């Protein structure tokens, strides 16, 4: 399945060490004036080699649009785009041609398809997410009144304790870890650097806050808004968990503590529901958290198996993120934007 979305759809192609990656966006209305600098800015936030705490693979990630745009505006036709792979080092992966890396997709891909591209993980590589960022950047420009802000909220056992209401989202891009609290950000950077120097990796979480979503987006039963957001987030490489609103903390509470009591205008005094009730947006802020595991490739000796079923030793090579969450921030925003664009079109179609 290489297509994401129902009405606003993104179909992608390409592998980590192929010539290019790219995609086709369908369902984009005609007449949308695109800001190409903003689209490239989103890609720059995700690209490798941008700081000392991410993979040092050097890619410009410059997007080239091939169709569906005329004089800076969308035409309603499919929007084709591609991004060149400029800095592959396929020889770094020669040692795993017949070896399955622990906690990677190597083993499952080989068993499912009988063939795999071992160079950088091929299609399973997070390189694919650059395509998603392009789709999300276009979707953001359709959702001009809706604000989507994601940020790093934890690295390992180091958490940003402040509620999002006390944060200045303008500070998220002021540091390389993308945490909108400078003091906590400095601690996170120090932790990632320490882990990297030891040849290890570490996980973390990204929190996303969506504001100004109108009441009524989302469908009951099988197409709930939070379910679609959860499906999107769980499709991101290395994601192990998703929670919205009170999340797992809500399971510890009593109903008298958890209920969001109404104000007379229909807003609520608290927002433990996370802006969604019955699967439908209620006009309050939508917020959720996404958990990312540590990167599976570590620069340490590990025991694993090869294609013959033999136990062997392997040592990670190549260029890898010691922690994925700094570069995951724009990916989370992009997928959220595409989900919301889908529901925007679905909701508006009911008014005709």
Image: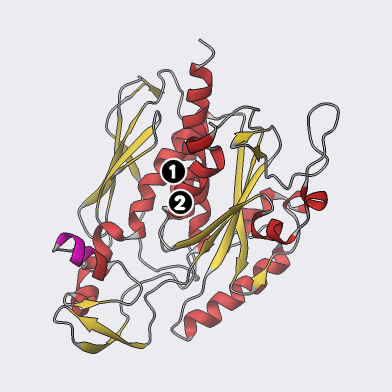
Give how far across and how far down residue 265 sits, in percent.
Answer: 82, 26
Please state which of residues 277 and 242 is positioned toward the viewer in this rendering: 277
Q: Which residue is more in the foreground, 263 or 235?
A: 263
Residue 224's mark?
Answer: none
In the rendered image, which residue does mark 2 sit on? 44
Asked if residue 137 is among those painted magenta in the image, a careful observer would answer: no
Question: Is 127 located above or below residue 344 in the figure?
Answer: below
Label the magenta part by its dominant secondary structure.
Answer: helix
Residue 177 is situated, as x and y percent measured from the top left of the image, at 58, 64
Q: Which residues are magenta?
A: 109-113
Q: Is residue 256 above or below residue 178?
A: above
> Does 68 sit above or below residue 318?
above
Quarter assignment of residue 295: bottom left
Neighbours of disc 2 within 10 Å: few (<14), some (14-19), many (20+): many
Left or right: 275, with 79 as reference point: right
Image check: 62 left or right of 345? left
Q: Is residue 271 visible?
A: yes
Q: Circle 1 — which element? A: helix
Contact, mark 1 vs mark 2 (Cβ under 8 Å): yes
Q: Position of residue 350 (x, y in %)?
A: 51, 16
- Residue 336 position within the rendered picture, expressed as x and y whole percent measured from the top left: 51, 42
Which quadrant does the N terminus fall into? top left
Residue, far top: 352
Classed neighbour count for the residue bearing mark 1: other residues with Cα under 10 Å, few (<14), some (14–19), many (≥20): some
Residue position marked by numbered label 1 in the rendering: 40
Color style of the picture: secondary structure
């Amino acid at each position: 399945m290489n297509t994401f979305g129902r009405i606003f759809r993104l179909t992608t192609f390409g592998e980590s060490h192929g010539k290019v990656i790219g995609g086709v966006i369908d369902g984009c209305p005609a007449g949308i004036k695109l800001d190409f600098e903003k689209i490239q800015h989103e890609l720059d936030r995700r690209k490798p080699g941008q700081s000392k705490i991410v993979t040092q693979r050097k890619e410009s990630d410059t997007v080239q649009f091939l169709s569906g745009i005329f004089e800076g505006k969308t035409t309603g036709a499919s929007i084709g785009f591609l991004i060149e792979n400029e800095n592959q080092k396929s020889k770094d992966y020669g040692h795993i041609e017949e070896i399955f890396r622990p906690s990677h997709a190597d083993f499952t891909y080989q068993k499912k398809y009988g063939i795999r591209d071992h160079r950088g993980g091929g299609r399973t590589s997070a390189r694919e997410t650059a395509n998603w960022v392009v789709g999300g950047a276009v979707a953001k420009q359709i959702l001009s009144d809706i604000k989507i802000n994601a940020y790093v909220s934890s690295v390992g056992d180091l958490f940003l304790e402040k509620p999002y209401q006390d944060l200045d989202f303008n500070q998220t891009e002021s540091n390389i870890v993308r945490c909108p609290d400078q003091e906590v950000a400095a601690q996170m950077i120090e932790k990632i650097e320490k882990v990297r120097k030891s040849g290890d990796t570490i996980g973390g979480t990204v929190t996303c806050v969506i504001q100004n979503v109108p009441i009524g987006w989302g469908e009951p039963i099988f197409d709930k808004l939070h379910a679609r957001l959860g499906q999107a987030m769980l499709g991101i490489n290395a994601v192990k968990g998703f929670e919205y609103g009170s999340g797992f903390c809500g399971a510890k509470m009593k109903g008298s503590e958890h209920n969001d009591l109404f104000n007379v205008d229909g807003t609520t005094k608290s927002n433990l529901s996370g802006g969604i009730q019955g699967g439908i947006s209620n006009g309050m802020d939508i917020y959720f958290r996404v958990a990312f595991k540590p990167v599976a490739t570590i620069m340490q000796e590990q025991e694993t198996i090869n294609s013959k079923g033999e136990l062997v030793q392997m040592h990670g090579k190549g260029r890898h993120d010691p922690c994925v969450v700094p570069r995951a921030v724009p990916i989370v925003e992009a997928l959220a934007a595409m989900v919301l664009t889908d529901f925007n079109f679905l909701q508006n179609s009911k008014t005709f």
